[in-house]
Structure formats: structure tokens, C-alpha cells
Image (cartoon, rainbow, N blue to C red):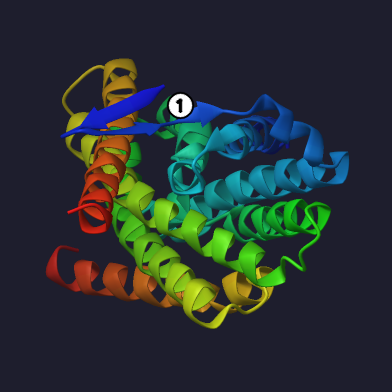
């Protein structure tokens, strides 16, 4: 998949081989955290009401585990190339976090569509529309940011 | 109990799937978008609508907007600190979690006063 704008092209690629670098334990941790946070969101909503419970639908559930995994993978990659890699790994996790912050704007869009749409329209259509808004907003902001960065590098 | 187990399983599957998607995508900043995917919401919203109705789910979604604003501040702070000071990622991202709690609960408190 690629995005092109004003003479620049940004390629987004899927590297399925990257999944081999992840240990089964890491998958299990994500599954556990994801499951626990989903249960917790439901329990908190029951105990304290939907106002507080709703906050936890946007809780950074597996963010720390995911970011530290990126640090680890990047460090190992650099070490295989003969470098120390610790600092590079931490910067890679920082770059990933920047992407997540753009995704949060899409996440807010997703929630707004649900908030406005659910009382009025068919639930399935609203959920599909909200997911579409999240994807388009997040990817759109990322493309916009990337194009501005490239223009700064190659004025 | 059955419902809790079902929530746990569906939450685990959806959250892990988005995490795997983020892992295979390049460049990293693009993959990071999936770190803020609406995974917990997608896992629970159907169950919430089925059990408590659409109006109840809409109230949760209104609060989710506040949670997403807090997540934005948290992820931006994590990004800045990791690139600028390069601490250990797990330590930094866990130490910053009170930012999310403080902002989300603070915004919810404000909203409750304005629109109870």
C-alpha cells in the first residue's frame, strides 16, 4: 500500500516475517491484558455507571507492553547488525508512540460517532461508520504529518 | 460469570489482533496508529447494547471521547520523553499512566458539573 502526494511517495508495507520475532509469551501477555481490560471496563461501568466506565474504553491497555516490545525488537535488530541498539530501540518506541497519539484523534472521532449515532440509528451501521471514521481520520492525519515532514526535509 | 468469560475471550482476541496488525506494518509511525485502535470498545460495545441498550452505550461513548483525549496526552508525553530522554520504554510508559487517569477523570468531573 502506498500514499503519494506532491512528488513524494510513502510506502506502507506489511512484513509478516515480523511476527516470527515475537515469542508466544508476548502474545499471551497481550491476550491477557486485552481480556482483563475488557472485563474491567464492563465491571467498572456496572459499579460506577456508564460515565466512568466509558473512560476505560479508551484506556491504553496494551500500550506499555506493545511499546516495550518495539524497543526490544529494534534493539535486537541493531545488535544483529553489530551495534548496541538500546538508544535506537527507545527512539523507535517514541516514534511508535507518536503514531499512537495521531490514532487517539481517530479514536475520539470513533467515540463521537457512537455517542451521536447510537440513540438515533441502527447500531450495526453506527459501529461500522465509527470504525471507518477512526481509520480515515488516523490514516489521514498520518499522511498529512508525513507530507509536512518530507516537505521540511526536501523543501 | 459466563458473560465475564465471554468478555475476557473476545477482548483478548480483538486487542491481540490489533496489536499483531501494528506489529507487521511499516513504517513504525504508521504502525503506531494501531496502538490507539478502538479495540476494547469494539469488543464490548455489542455486549453493552445487547444488555443495557443503545442509550446506555451512547453515554459510555461520550465518556470515551474524554478517555481518548487523555490517551492523546499520554501518548504524546510518552513519545516526547522517549525521543528526548530515552528512558527504558516499559518504565516510562507505566510511570506515565497517572497522566491518563488524571486527565480522563478530571475531564469527566468537569463534564459532570456542566452536564450531569
Q: Residue B38's quadrant in the figure?
A: top left
The residue singled out by tag 1 in the image is B46
As drawn, the residue found furthest toward the bottom would be B85
Please indicate, yes or no, whether residue B26 appears anywhere in the rendered image: yes
- Can residue A118 be seen from the camera position used here? no
In terms of depth relative to the viewer, which is nearer, B44 or B17? B17
Front in this rendered view, residue A130 or A154 = A154
- Say left or right for A27 vs B77: right
Image position, residue A24 (x, y; %): 86, 39
The residue closer to the viewer here, A132 or A48, is A132
Number of dots carrying numbers: 1
Q: Residue at x 71, y 70 (%)?
A: A86
The percent coordinates of residue A128 (x first, y second) are: 33, 20
Q: Residue at x 71, y 45 (%)?
A: A30
Name the chain under label 1: B
Q: Residues within 10 Å of mark 1 (few under 14, many from 20)?
A: some
Residue B56 pos. (x, y %): 33, 40
Q: Is residue A137 left or right of residue A6?
A: right
Task: Write down the quadrant of residue A8 in the picture.
Answer: top left
Up/down of A30 relative to B55, above or below: below
Q: Quadrant of the C terminus of chain A?
A: bottom left
Quadrant of the drawing holding the N terminus of chain A: top left
Label 1: state its secondary structure: helix
Q: Position of residue A85 (x, y in %)?
A: 72, 65
Kindly identify the residue that appears in the image at 48 percent across and 79 percent down. Answer: B84
Amino acid at each position: 500500500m502506498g500514499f503519494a502526494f506532491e512528488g513524494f511517495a510513502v510506502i506502507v508495507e506489511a512484513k509478516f516475517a515480523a511476527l516470527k520475532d515475537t515469542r508466544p509469551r508476548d502474545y499471551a501477555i497481550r491476550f491477557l491484558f486485552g481480556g482483563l481490560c475488557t472485563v474491567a471496563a464492563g465491571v467498572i461501568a456496572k459499579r460506577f455507571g456508564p460515565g466512568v466506565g466509558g473512560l476505560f474504553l479508551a484506556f491504553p491497555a496494551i500500550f506499555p507492553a506493545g511499546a516495550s516490545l518495539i524497543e526490544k525488537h529494534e534493539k535486537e535488530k541493531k545488535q544483529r547488525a553489530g551495534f548496541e541498539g538500546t538508544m535506537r530501540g527507545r527512539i523507535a518506541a517514541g516514534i511508535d508512540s507518536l503514531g499512537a497519539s495521531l490514532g487517539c484523534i481517530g479514536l475520539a472521532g470513533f467515540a463521537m460517532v457512537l455517542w451521536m449515532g447510537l440513540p438515533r440509528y441502527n447500531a450495526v451501521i453506527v459501529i461500522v461508520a465509527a470504525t471507518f471514521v477512526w481509520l480515515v481520520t488516523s490514516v489521514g492525519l498520518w499522511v498529512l504529518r508525513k507530507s509536512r515532514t518530507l516537505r521540511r526535509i526536501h523543501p | 460469570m459466563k458473560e465475564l468469560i465471554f468478555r475476557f475471550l473476545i477482548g483478548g482476541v480483538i486487542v491481540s489482533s490489533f496489536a499483531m496488525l501494528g506489529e507487521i506494518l511499516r513504517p513504525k509511525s504508521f504502525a503506531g496508529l494501531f496502538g490507539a485502535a478502538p479495540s476494547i470498545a469494539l469488543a464490548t460495545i455489542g455486549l453493552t447494547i445487547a444488555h443495557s441498550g443503545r442509550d446506555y452505550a451512547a453515554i459510555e461513548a461520550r465518556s470515551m471521547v474524554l478517555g481518548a483525549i487523555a490517551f492523546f496526552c499520554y501518548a504524546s508525553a510518552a513519545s516526547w520523553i522517549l525521543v528526548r530522554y530515552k528512558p527504558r520504554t516499559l518504565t516510562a510508559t507505566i510511570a506515565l499512566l497517572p497522566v491518563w487517569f488524571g486527565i480522563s477523570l478530571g475531564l469527566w468531573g468537569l463534564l459532570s458539573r456542566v452536564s450531569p
